[in-house]
Image (cartoon, rainbow, N blue to C red):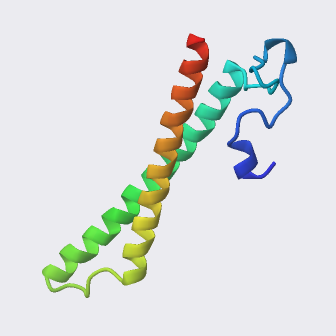
Amino acid sequence: MAPQEALHPGNQASDTARVKTTNQGTTMPTLAEYREYWTTLHDHYVEANEMAREARGLVSAAYVAALAGNGQGPTAEAIEHAEKLERLADKFARETRSIAEKALSQAAD
């Protein structure tokens, strides 16, 4: 299963006895599916955040080295890479929060 497919609850076989049905007749993911989805998103967030911190650290170290006269500073590519990883980590954090809110809302119904 592609990573994007794995990140959406309801894409995997579920226990239909536990699936809620909405007024429109569509099924909603079970709480177990939401939990699996949240765990997957959180794991991706942790990995992306660690990579972003490492990349930002390398950029900062290059700036410090340049200020000390021991280098030319970070490349534009290094800065762009760090920013891309930071945006990815932010995206996973937002999605993780969103899925938690959906699961809690469903549990309250």
- Determine the residue positioned at 37% across, 74% down: 79
Looking at the image, residue 4 lies above or below residue 75: above
**Tally of numbered discs:** 0
Residue 44 is situated, as x and y percent measured from the top left of the image, at 56, 46
Looking at the image, residue 109 lies above or below residue 79: above
Q: Viewed as shown, does residue 15 lie left or right of 99?
A: right
Residue 39 is situated, as x and y percent measured from the top left of the image, at 60, 32
Q: Nearer the viewer, residue 23 or 41?
A: 23
- Determine the residue positioned at 55% across, 20% down: 105
Q: Nearer the viewer, residue 13 or 26?
A: 26
Q: Viewed as shown, does residue 45 lie left or right of 38?
A: left
Q: Nearer the viewer, residue 109 or 68?
A: 109
Residue 48 is situated, as x and y percent measured from the top left of the image, at 49, 53
Residue 27 is situated, as x and y percent measured from the top left of the image, at 79, 25
Looking at the image, residue 9 lies above or below residue 67: above
- Determine the residue positioned at 60% across, 11% down: 109
- Determine the residue positioned at 34% across, 68% down: 58
